[in-house]
Amino acid sequence: MNRWEGLDEFVAVVECASFSRAAERLRVSSSHVSRQVALLEDRLQARLLYRTTRKVSLTDAGQAFYARCQRLIEERDEAFVAVSDLHRAPSGLLRMTAAVAYGERFIVPVVNAFMSAHPQLRVEIELTNRVMDLVQEGFDLAIRMGRLESSSLIATRIAPRRMFLCAAPAYLERYGRPHTLSELAAHNCLIGSNDTWMFRDQGREYPFKPRGNWRCNSGDAVLDAARRGLGLCCLPDYYVRDALAHGELVSLLEDCQPPDTAVWAVSPQRRHPLPRVRLLVEALRDALAGRPEYRSEAG
């Protein structure tokens, strides 16, 4: 028995909300569609659809199965496209995720430009600071920053990322400037989403647990607090670049600067890599390389 039998019919019924309209889309008879869906339910030993004379709706099992079937069919069709025409314009659904602030500022504008060039593509973007399980939650692509843990995911470096320890001149006038890592413990630290700050001294890396009277999981909020002289901050280059250039912040402990990291495009391993993912990753890498935040880091 062909394990694909009934999947196309089932998905068509769900998307058309009708057996007859699904039959028209697939250019088969309504009885054929009904029979294939019934056989599929028999194989699964589960009811997938509620049927009445007026409408068709999904059961709970059908809802879960439909989400997987939709992805399977799209990836199957994409595999045929990848083999038959490597230069064909990207199409289908691409689901991706990125951190909120970085996604809004850097990623979404590039994706929007990419969509303008490829209107046949569908994109769903979830901006969240939670690290998503790409496989379990059905994502094709994630933008992640920092250092990646070892995993089976495919990672492509799309931009540099340098961390800076900074403070406002007003804060340094009141509390003094730290000259060694050991002096950091005496300073008020503005704590963002990272509970550990990393530094480097004589080739070795040192973790530091910041302590202070202020905490917020927003980089922009940390930046504002640092500008107002409330304490030391440790933020990526794209947050503090302008403030450093205008003298609103001062870079500290430059000889112990935290290890350089990167911005990564991460995707699940697939037997047939999706052309739409590869092309978007290339577009992101090219677009980010042209931004002023990264031009000095070229190469």
Image (cartoon, rainbow, N blue to C red):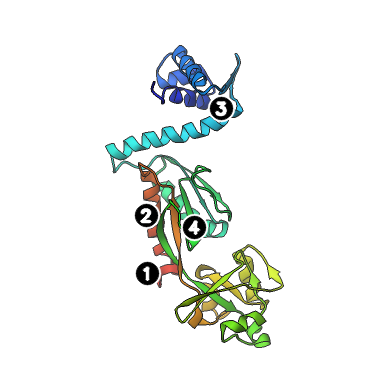
Three-letter code, disc 4: Arg
For marks 4 and 2, give the CA distance.
Answer: 16 Å
Task: Please tell me which of labels 3 and 1 falls first in the chain.
Answer: 3
In three-dimensional space, the C-alpha distance between marks 3 and 1, rounded to whole angstroms, equals 50 Å
Q: Nearer the viewer, mark 4 or mark 2?
A: 4
Q: In this figure, which residue is indicated by the disc labeled 3?
A: 62
Q: Nearer the viewer, mark 1 or mark 4?
A: 4
- Work out how far the residue at label 1 is from the one at label 4, CA to CA, in angstroms: 19 Å
For disc 4, the marked residue is 144
Please identify the quarter of the rendering in which residue 88 is found. top left
Helix, strand or loop under label 1: loop
- Amino acid type of the residue tagged 1 in the rendering: Ala
Residue 63 spot, x, y in % from top left: 57, 30
Q: Residues within 10 Å of mark 4 (few under 14, many from 20)?
A: many
Look at mark 1 in the image and give the residue it sits on.
298
In the depicted structure, whether residue 197 falls above or below residue 18: below
